[in-house]
Image (spheres, rainbow, N blue to C red):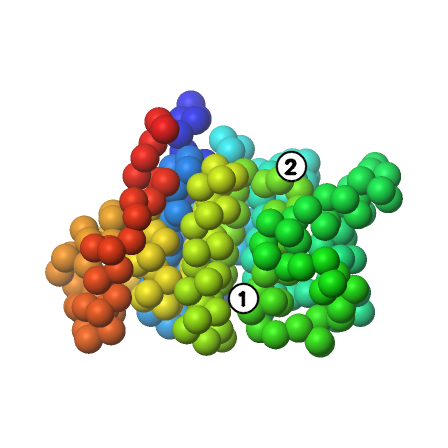
């Protein structure tokens, strides 16, 4: 029976490419309303896991349920249903180079095929406004945008169908510190105001500690630690020792003592 508090439920996941085992007996649950982050070393299968949650890749065995449905069951409508209820921000934005800003944002609405042109334009402009892209940038091409603006336009596109679930792949990768901080603040605001559930893959410790309600650490082909940033950082494991308790980790942990409480820690409000 599906627990309505769990947006994503992964049970005994096994992923394998040829003889290379990526995940073995991996289990986790993503709770409604939280920002759930996935970290791990190179080759640990973070991106593979996110692609499996999106239905883009199929595991060798195990189940992945999103909104209570096994998304890899042989029923095509599950993937279509998931795409309408979730949005994805790719690491480099993945904007269509031949489309301008407003057309990029409008594309998911157009693909549905049953909205008027006026409504499509209005919704696209609204989403651009939500992510801080001014009207005068709407007709620019992606090649004319800064890295930070590309991220914001891609985020507007990810939100254009009003998803309940948002996936973020390295959301601050390639941004300078000021742009990164501004983008983190934007994600925090949207998460709170839109009551989103967010699943994020990131290697950036500042982003990780600033945003995460809970963190899953993948190593040795499964989840070795799961909890709040503080709880996870105290688990005894070589990867966690290096990643969380090195110099950068100690500096980034200071964010926990200065940032406001995450919405994911305010269930019921």
Element at label 2: helix
- Quick check: 259 left or right of 100? left
Question: Does residue 173 appear to the left or right of 74 in the view shown?
Answer: left
Q: Name the residue under label 2.
A: 81
Q: Where is residue 108 in the image (x, y as percent from the top left)?
A: 73, 49
Where does the image place residue 268, in percent across and percent down from the top left?
35, 27
Residue 134 shows up from this direction: yes
Q: Residue at x 71, y 71 (%)?
A: 142
Q: Which mark is residue 91?
A: 1
Answer with the quarter of the image where residue 62 lies.
top left
**Percent x, y for residue 166?**
52, 47
Disc 1, SS:
loop
**How many numbered tags mark residues here?**
2
Location of residue 133 (image quadrant): bottom right
Residue depicted at x 46% and y 62%: 182
Question: Crowdedness of circle 1 by 10 Å Cα count: few (<14), some, many (20+)?
Answer: some
């Amino acid at each position: 029976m599906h627990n309505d508090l769990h947006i994503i439920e992964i049970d005994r996941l096994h992923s394998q490419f040829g003889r290379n085992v990526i995940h073995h007996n991996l289990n986790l649950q993503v709770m409604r309303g939280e920002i759930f982050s996935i970290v791990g070393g190179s080759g640990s299968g973070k991106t593979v896991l996110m692609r499996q949650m999106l239905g883009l890749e199929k595991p060798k065995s195990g189940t992945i349920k999103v909104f209570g449905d096994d998304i890899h069951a042989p029923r095509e409508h599950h993937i279509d249903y998931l795409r309408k209820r979730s949005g994805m921000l790719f690491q480099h934005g993945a904007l269509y180079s031949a489309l301008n800003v407003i057309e990029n944002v409008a594309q998911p609405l157009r693909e549905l095929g049953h909205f008027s042109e006026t409504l499509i334009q209005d919704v696209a402009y609204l989403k651009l406004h939500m992510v801080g892209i001014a009207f005068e940038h709407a007709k620019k091409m992606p090649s004319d945008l800064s890295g930070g603006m590309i991220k914001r336009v891609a985020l507007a596109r990810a939100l254009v169908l009003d998803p309940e679930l948002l996936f973020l792949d390295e959301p601050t990768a390639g941004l300078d510190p000021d742009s990164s901080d501004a983008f983190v603040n934007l994600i925090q605001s949207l998460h709170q105001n839109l009551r989103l559930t967010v699943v994020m893959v990131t290697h950036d410790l500042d982003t990780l500690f600033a945003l995460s309600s809970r963190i899953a650490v993948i190593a040795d082909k499964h989840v070795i630690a799961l909890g709040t940033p503080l709880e996870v950082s105290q688990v005894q494991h070589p990867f966690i020792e290096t990643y969380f308790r090195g110099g950068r980790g100690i500096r980034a942990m200071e964010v926990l003592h200065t940032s406001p409480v995450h919405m994911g820690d305010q269930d019921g409000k």
